[in-house]
Image: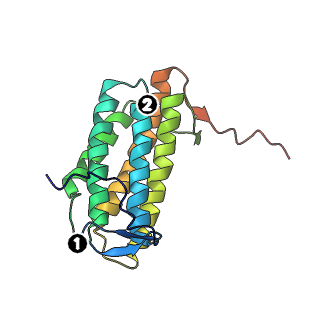
Amino acid sequence: MGNRLSKIYTKTGDDGSTGLGDGTRVSKDSARVSAYGTVDEANSAIGLILACDIPDDVREILVSVQHHMFDLGGELCIPGHSAIFDEDITHLENTLDKFNADLPALKDFILPGGGMAAAHCHLARTITRRAERETVTLSHHDAVRPEAIRYLNRLSDLLFVLARVLARASGHGEVLWNHQRRKG
């Protein structure tokens, strides 16, 4: 185990810089900090889902995802570090397929909602999409392993499916977009 933080504030970031995992100092608004910061934000949003009353199988996958998201944040924080692998992405795909198999085919767009857990899941999905976009932006300036981007892409898909599952499990049901509400 690495060093433990005994003091939370160091004052080293007061100049608008922060230290990466390899010791390099960069601006707090750098593409790298934005990418791993948004991964952390998405992980926190997943924590909101876990704070809700949810089925055990959904809880189990989301706890696993939180660990992988922490790994991914580390990968993005330490240039050249590898923490997300093809098998992690395959696991997301298999999980997505399992949960999606019992859902009816989509015929309409779904609005974020469907109960507290589903709404939090939609929020986590949109933050994960932003993390993906910011990681792609980072990849235009710096080396980013394709596994990182693929993981975020699959995770947002999984969160969409889990939001559908949670909306149904809560009894609220999915909120469908009414595209015919406006006439004329």
Exactly how many numbered labels are in the figure?
A: 2
Q: How far apart are marks 1 and 2 (CA)?
A: 37 Å
Left or right of 6, for residue 26? right
With respect to residue 177, does 147 lie above or below?
below
Where does the image place residue 71, in percent across and percent down from the top left?
25, 54
Residue in front for this viewpoint, 52 or 101? 52
Q: Are marks 1 and 2 in contact (CB under 8 Å)?
A: no
Regarding residue 83, the answer to whether it shows in the image is: yes
Q: Name the residue under label 1.
A: 80
Residue at 47%, 39% (x, y): give it.
Answer: 121
The amino acid sitting under disc 1 is Gly
Where does the image place residue 135, in percent across and percent down from the top left?
40, 66
Mark 1, Cα crowd under 10 Å, few <14 / some 14-19 / many 20+, is few
Residue in front for this viewpoint, 74 or 11? 11
Left or right of 6, for residue 51? right
Q: Mark 2 points at which residue?
A: 165
